[in-house]
Amino acid sequence: MNSERYEDLVSRLLEGEITASEAEDLARAVAESPALRRNLQEHLVLWEVWSQAQSPERSAEAFVRGLKTRLQAEAEGVDAFAVAVRAKLEYESLRHDQEREESQAILLRSRYQLTNEIRTKVKSLWAMAHRPGGIVWVASLAILVTLGVVWLVSPHSAQATTTIRGEVVCTCCELHEGHEHWPALRVTTGDGICIYHLEHNRVAAGIHAHGTRGPLTVKGYVRTEGERHWCQVVQIAADEETPRREPQSHEP
Amino acid sequence: MDAVESRSVQEFEGWVREHQVGLRAFIRALGADEAWVDDLAQETFIIAYRRMETSLAVTNLAKWLRGIARKLVANELRKEARRSRLFPSAIAEVLCRQTDEDMALDREFDHLLPPMQECVARLPPRSQELLRRRYAGGENATSLAHEFGMKANAVRQTLLRLRVAVKECVERKIGGAWL
C-alpha cells in the first residue's frame, strides 16, 4: 500500500467514514508494518487527547461527573431491582393465596349445588333409561357431560404475559425520541424490526439503572397504541437478572 | 458513609482524575470508536472501583487499569459488528492484539497537550477553525464540507494534512518517541 492510500484510509477511519472493505485494507497494512501501526496509534492517541481538551462534554470534569452518576445509578439500580423482584414475588404469592381461597369457596358452593343437581338428574335419567331407546340417549348425554367437565377443569389464563427477547436500546441516544434516557426493546422479527417501548415501572427502572445493552428477555403485558407497541415489564428472565456490564474476566 | 469508605471514594476520585486522560487515549489506541471511548473508560474505572481492595495493593495503577481496559476491549471484539463499540473488527483486532508489543502500557499522555496547543496556534485561522469545529463541535467531514463550502473529500484531505503537520510539530517539540 502506498503512503497516499494509507493516509486516505487513516483519514477515513478518524472521520468514522471507513467502509468494511477499506477497513480490511488498512488492517492488512498495519498488521504487516509495525511502523504504520505505530503511526496509526500515535494519531489516535494525539487526537484523542486533543478531543478531550476541546470538547466540553469530554472534559475531565464531565468524565468524572459521568462516572459518578454511573456508579450511583448502579448502586441504586441493584437496590431498586432487588426491591422490584421482592415486591413482584410478594404480590404473586398474595395473589395465589387469594385465588386459592376464592376457588375453594367456589368449589364448596359448586359441590353442594352439584350434589343436589346430580341427585335430581340421576333420578330422571334412571326413569328415562327404562323407556324404549332411552339407554342410547343417556349414553350420548354422559359423553357430552364428560367432555364438558374435562374442558372446565383444564387450565385457562385470563390475562397472559408475553415473553419478548430483544436488544435494549435507549429511547434518547438510539431512537432519538425526546430527551429522556429510557430503555426500549428492539426486536428483530422475520418481517423487520419492532420496537417495544417499556412502560415506567420499577422493573423497567432496574433495566434503566443497569444501563443494560445487548440482548434481554423480559415477560410482560403487551399492548399496541396506534403504531406504537408498549410492554409493561413484570419480570426479567432469570438468566439475565444480573447486570451485564461486566465482562467475563477482568483481572489483567 | 463511614470514614474509611469516604477516604476510599476520595482516593478513587483522585485516581480517576490522575489517569483518565491516559486511559481514554489508550482505549482509543486499542481501536475504540470515538463515540464510545468514554463509555469504555468509565466501565474500566467501575471495575477498578469494585476491586479497590486489590487495587490498593497494585504498584503500577496505570498499567493495571490498562490491563482491565484491554480485557474489556477484547471482550467487545466478540460482539456482533452492529453492537460493537469499536472500529470495524478487522482494524480493532490488529490494534487490540498487538498493543502490548507496540505501546508502553503505563505511559501517560497529558504532556502532549501543551505542545499540541502551541502547534495548532501556529496554523492559519481557517485551519484552526476547521479543527475546532471538528473536535469541539464533533462535526464530521460531511457536515463540515457544507459549512466551509468544500467537498467532503477536500475536508478530509485538509484535516489529514493538518493532522500530519501538527503531529510532526509535536514530535519536534517533544524530541523523541512518546508512544
Image (tube, helix red, strand yellow):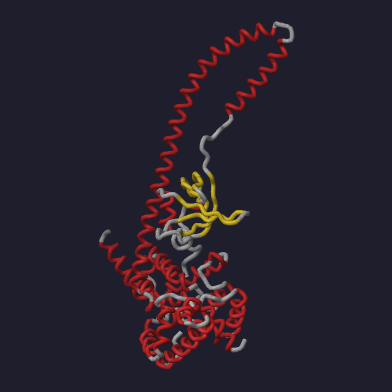
Q: Residue furthest front?
A: B149
Q: Say left or right for B175 vs A145.
A: left
Determine the image quadrant of residue A155.
top right
Residue at (43, 68) in percent of width and height: B39
- The answer to whether residue A147 is above or below residue A206 is above
Residue A196 place in picture, x, y as percent: 51, 52
Locate the N terminus of chain A and report the quarter of the image it occupies. Answer: bottom right
| Left or right: B111 in relation to B159 | left
Q: Against A74, is B150 above or below? A: below
Question: In this rendering, is residue B79 above or below B134?
Answer: above
Residue B50 can be seen, yes or no: yes
Residue A149: x %, y % from top left:
60, 23
A94, A123: nearer the viewer: A123
Q: Residue furthest right?
A: A133
Q: Nearer the viewer, residue A131 or A32?
A: A131
Give residue B145's position: percent from left, percent from top.
49, 80
At x 66%, y 6%, the residue is A127
Report if residue B102 is visible in the image. Answer: no
Where residue B22 sits in the image (x, y, percent)? 41, 78
In the drawing, does residue A235 fall left or right of residue A145?
Answer: left
Total numbered labels: 0
Q: Residue furthest left?
A: B3
Does residue B80 appear to the left or right of A177 in the view shown? right
